[in-house]
Amino acid sequence: MRIAVTIFLTDETISPTRLARELEQRGFAGLYLPEHTHIPVERTTPYPAGGDLPPSTAVRSTPSSPSVRRRP
């Protein structure tokens, strides 16, 4: 079985390069880094869990920052 990891990167998470190395050392088959291609200027829809929007959802990496290459 081939297992991969998916993670949203923020300024508070592990760096993509370090994460890729750690996963490769542990035999994981892949790393998927989803991103938001667009973020609304204002939020009119309430947060589904209630209360304020968690800070981690407001800070995402830029699309080019997690660009890492796998060794051949």
Image (spheres, helix red, strand yellow):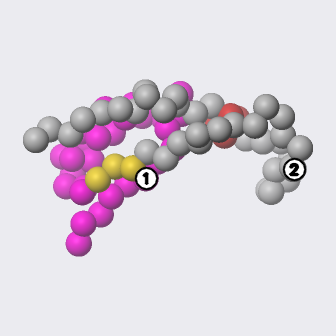
Q: How many discs mark residues in the rendered view?
A: 2
- The amino acid at mark 1 is Thr
Q: Looking at the image, is 38 positioned above or below residue 48?
A: above
Determine which quarter of the picture holds residue 37.
top right
Using residue 15 as the reference point, say whether residue 2 is left or right of it: left
Q: Mark 1 or mark 2, which is nearer the start of the sequence?
A: 1
Mark 2 neighbour class, 10 Å CA radius: few under 14, some 14 to 19, many 20 or more: few
Using residue 33 as the reference point, say whether residue 56 is left or right of it: right
The residue tagged 2 is 46
Q: Secondary structure at mark 1?
A: strand
Which of the two residues, 38 or 9, is positioned nearer the viewer here?
38
Q: Residue at (39%, 50%) from the top-left corner?
A: 32
* Magenta region, residue range: 1-29
Which of the two residues, 26 or 36, is positioned nearer the viewer here?
36
Name the spot of residue 60 as percent of width and height, x first.
58, 33
Q: Residue at (63%, 31%) from the top-left corner?
A: 59
Q: Looking at the image, is 57 positioned above or below residue 50?
A: above
List the single residue furthest toward the front: 38
List the single residue furthest toward the left: 72
Name the spot of residue 30 as percent of width and height, x first.
29, 53
- The amino acid at mark 2 is Pro
Quarter of the image with the C terminus is top left
> Residue 7 magenta-drawn?
yes
Measure the alpha-carbon separation of dots 2 and 1.
26 Å
The residue tagged 1 is 6
Is residue 47 visible to us here? yes
> Residue 4 magenta-drawn?
yes
Is residue 18 visible to us here? no
Name the spot of residue 20 as percent of width and height, x first.
29, 41
Quarter of the image with the N terminus is bottom left
Mark 1 neighbour class, 10 Å CA radius: few under 14, some 14 to 19, many 20 or more: few
In the rendering, which numbered label is found on residue 48? Answer: none
